[in-house]
């Protein structure tokens, strides 16, 4: 339901839009961040520095004292609790508001000796304000009282939110009906009402998340069993021994886990996760080699042509019989590869989304590996897996989820963690810089360029839609005009595919010194010479995204440097960025990020229709999470709860792309 249908003013709608609220449903799910308790304490109980509120009668003429630079102090006296109190208010220079004989409600701090430093005031009777009041996280220009009024109006339309929790669970766990939970979370009369509403809404969040995630998994694996793959362990060992470097213990363990999955009669459904540069690709290559040895065909899927080509070159170096299939190939090249895949003469193919097309068929597909798995949607994965019978499925992610959360977030999926980095890799030196200009670090960056190093400059937006946000196009234009001797390129999501690939190739070939980009460079690009990164408006990104981005400047034994620029005044945002100065382990970064933001952002599914946690806390709500794991499984097995099943179906269909 649109906000306009609620008869909201144009100004309020614009302010809500700024908070990414476009519908009544989104408005109602904008929950309070805390509650204020307004209660009146008798004067005799006041102590110095107490927060107080009281009602009084103005008993003298207000005096305004101007302090210069638009600052002022207003003083007047009120009678309250049969005492005469002296009130001081800063920057409210309106003497006419404080007329003799007027009733006023004052909020402030008692300073002793009958003096009150007022922080706020209004002319409403105090008895109408006593009690609990929600406090929301707001955009500039929207006041708390306005937001409360808007929410109260929206609660008249609470029926637009479907109640998807099955009645049997609501009764068994003593949960509230959805309508009542919404009423109590936004307009509570007591702390008990808040607790009951929170318990109900957390359960719903976790249950919806689990139902969708389990629904996604069941769509990807139609059956559990397969014919075991047979291959020579000795040949795999010989290949590992032939590498010019020693694999880490985590890589070796990961390879053993995957080979055991392939040899078993159960279909592999495994996630390999670890930081950028930890060596996931070599683990994937071992699985591809084993599949080829077993006589089955294998697919290695990447989200971009440049990354697919990178994998293709790596596989060629290992002397594997690899082919390359992307949409930019000409018709003759495509036909040759399609024929080879169909007849079985091509055992291994690396490619992009082009491999999902109906025209791509396989003789005997046995393994699908997806790099940056969150970049592909449920339908896409399913389309590829259905090109073979009982295909093993391996996914790779550079956003590692700690084991404590993985069970809930990924359910029955097996997980391989690669925590060790190859010898010689140094953690990126990360520095938070307050401000909106890279001038404090420019001399160091230009010195690096003179020594032959390359630089990423990352912006949160492509073009100037929001004046408060730095955008790639204006930064690029500014740098081009001021750094004449430096070769600068621009990369963003609105460019044509061919343009993007061309710019990336120029950067890979060191035909550019600086690449100004949006987060598209987060995905898998490997340029060992790029050891500097500057991120504008860093507070606008999640920590996991920032950690992945900075991993791009740590692809060699050279020291990488990442500068986080931010103008944010928000203490929590500043502390988050400073945390990255000390945190280098991706698992710890994700754990910290999960506590702050929830899994939707971390898994790359926030915009996809899959549910996220707004109230649920992965650390504190483990009991509810475990119950929801079990309940979601039962809902999907019974196939009776129409409201929830409809919700799951819509969410999975909407999740065509996970990013």
Image: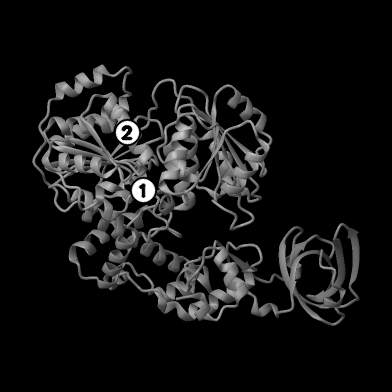
Q: Which of marks 2 and 1 is nearer the N terminus?
A: 2
Label 2 to label 1: alpha-carbon separation: 17 Å
- Is residue 270 shown above or below 160? above
- The one of 629 and 566 positioned closer to us in this rendering: 566
Q: Picture quarter containing residue 258? A: top left
- Point 31% across, 22% down: residue: 247
- The one of 584 and 446 positioned closer to us in this rendering: 446
The count of marks equals 2
* Label 1 environment density (alpha carbons within 10 Å; few <14, some 14–19, many ≥20): some
- Point 76% across, 69% down: residue: 43
- The one of 259 and 310 positioned closer to us in this rendering: 310
Of badges 2 and 1, nearer the viewer stands 2
Residue 165 visible from this viewpoint: yes
Q: Picture quarter containing residue 486? A: top right
Q: Name the residue under label 1.
A: 375
Residue 150 percent location from the top left of the image? 57, 75
From the viewer's perspective, tell me whether residue 227 is left or right of residue 249.
left
Residue 609 percent location from the top left of the image? 37, 61
* Label 2 environment density (alpha carbons within 10 Å; few <14, some 14–19, many ≥20): many
Render colour scheme: one colour
- Is residue 5 shown above or below 357? below
- Point 28% across, 19% down: residue: 243
Question: In which quadrant of the rendered image does the N terminus lie?
Answer: bottom left
Q: Picture quarter containing residue 141? A: bottom right
Q: Is mark 1 on a helix, strand or loop?
A: helix
From the viewer's perspective, tell me whether residue 136 is left or right of residue 177.
right
Which mark, residue 120? none
Q: What element carries label 2?
A: helix
- Is residue 270 shown above or below 133? above
Which mark, residue 311? 2
């Amino acid at each position: 339901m649109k906000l306009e249908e609620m008869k909201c003013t144009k100004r309020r709608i614009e302010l809500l839009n700024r908070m990414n609220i476009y519908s009544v449903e989104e408005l109602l799910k904008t929950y309070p961040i805390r509650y204020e308790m307004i209660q009146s304490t008798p004067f005799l109980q006041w102590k110095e520095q107490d927060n107080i509120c009281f009602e009084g009668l103005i008993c003298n003429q207000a005096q305004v004292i101007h302090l210069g630079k638009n600052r002022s102090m207003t003083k007047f006296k009120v009678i309250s609790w049969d005492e005469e109190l002296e009130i001081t208010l800063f920057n409210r220079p309106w003497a006419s508001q404080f007329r003799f004989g007027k009733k006023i409600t004052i909020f402030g701090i008692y300073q002793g000796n009958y003096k009150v430093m007022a922080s706020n005031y209004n002319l409403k009777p105090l008895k109408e304000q006593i009690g609990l009041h929600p406090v929301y996280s707001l955009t500039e220009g929207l006041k708390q009282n306005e937001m409360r009024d808007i929410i109260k109006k929206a609660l008249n339309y609470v029926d637009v939110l479907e109640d998807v929790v099955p009645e049997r669970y609501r009764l068994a766990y003593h949960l509230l009906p959805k309508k009542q939970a919404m009423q109590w979370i936004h307009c509570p009369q007591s702390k008990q009402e808040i607790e009951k509403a929170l318990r109900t809404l957390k359960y719903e969040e976790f249950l919806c998340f689990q139902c969708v995630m389990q629904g996604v998994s069941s769509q990807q694996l139609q059956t559990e069993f397969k014919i075991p793959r047979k291959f020579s362990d000795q040949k795999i060992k010989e290949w590992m021994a032939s590498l010019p470097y020693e694999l880490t213990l985590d890589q070796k363990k990961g390879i053993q886990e995957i080979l055991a999955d392939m040899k078993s009669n159960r279909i592999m459904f495994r996630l390999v996760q670890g930081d950028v540069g930890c060596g996931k690709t070599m683990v994937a290559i071992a699985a591809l080699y084993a599949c080829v040895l077993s006589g089955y065909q294998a697919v290695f899927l990447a989200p971009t042509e440049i990354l697919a080509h990178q994998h293709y070159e790596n596989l060629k170096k290992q002397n594997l019989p690899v082919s390359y299939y992307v949409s930019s190939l000409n018709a003759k090249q495509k036909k040759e590869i399609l024929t080879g895949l169909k007849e079985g003469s091509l055992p291994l193919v690396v490619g992009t989304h082009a491999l999902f097309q109906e025209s791509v068929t396989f003789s005997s597909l046995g393994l699908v590996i997806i790099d940056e798995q969150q970049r592909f949607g449920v339908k896409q994965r399913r389309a590829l897996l259905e090109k073979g019978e009982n295909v093993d499925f391996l996914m790779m992610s550079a956003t590692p989820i700690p084991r404590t959360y993985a069970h809930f977030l990924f359910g029955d999926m097996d997980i391989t963690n690669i925590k060790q980095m190859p010898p010689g890799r140094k953690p990126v030196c990360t520095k938070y810089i307050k401000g909106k200009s890279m001038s404090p670090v420019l001399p160091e960056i230009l010195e690096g360029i003179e020594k032959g190093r390359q630089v990423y400059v990352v912006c949160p937006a492509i073009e100037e839609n929001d004046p408060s946000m730095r955008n790639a196009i204006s930064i690029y234009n500014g740098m081009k005009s001021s750094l004449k001797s430096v070769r600068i390129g621009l990369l963003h999501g609105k460019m044509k595919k061919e343009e993007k690939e061309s710019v990336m190739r120029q950067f890979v070939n060191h035909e550019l010194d600086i690449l100004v980009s949006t987060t598209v460079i987060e995905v898998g690009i490997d340029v060992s010479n790029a050891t500097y990164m500057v991120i504008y408006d860093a507070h606008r990104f999640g920590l996991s995204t920032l950690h992945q981005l900075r991993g791009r400047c740590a692809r060699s034994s050279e020291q990488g440097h990442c500068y986080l620029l931010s103008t944010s005044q928000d203490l929590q945002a500043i502390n988050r960025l400073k945390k990255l100065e000390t945190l280098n382990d991706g698992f710890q970064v994700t754990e910290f990020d999960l506590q702050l933001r929830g899994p939707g952002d971390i898994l790359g599914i926030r915009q996809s229709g899959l549910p996220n946690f707004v109230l649920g806390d992965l650390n504190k709500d483990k009991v509810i999470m475990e119950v929801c794991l079990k309940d979601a499984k039962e809902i999907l097995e019974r196939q009776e709860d129409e409201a929830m099943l409809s919700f799951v179906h819509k969410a999975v269909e909407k999740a065509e792309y996970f990013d």
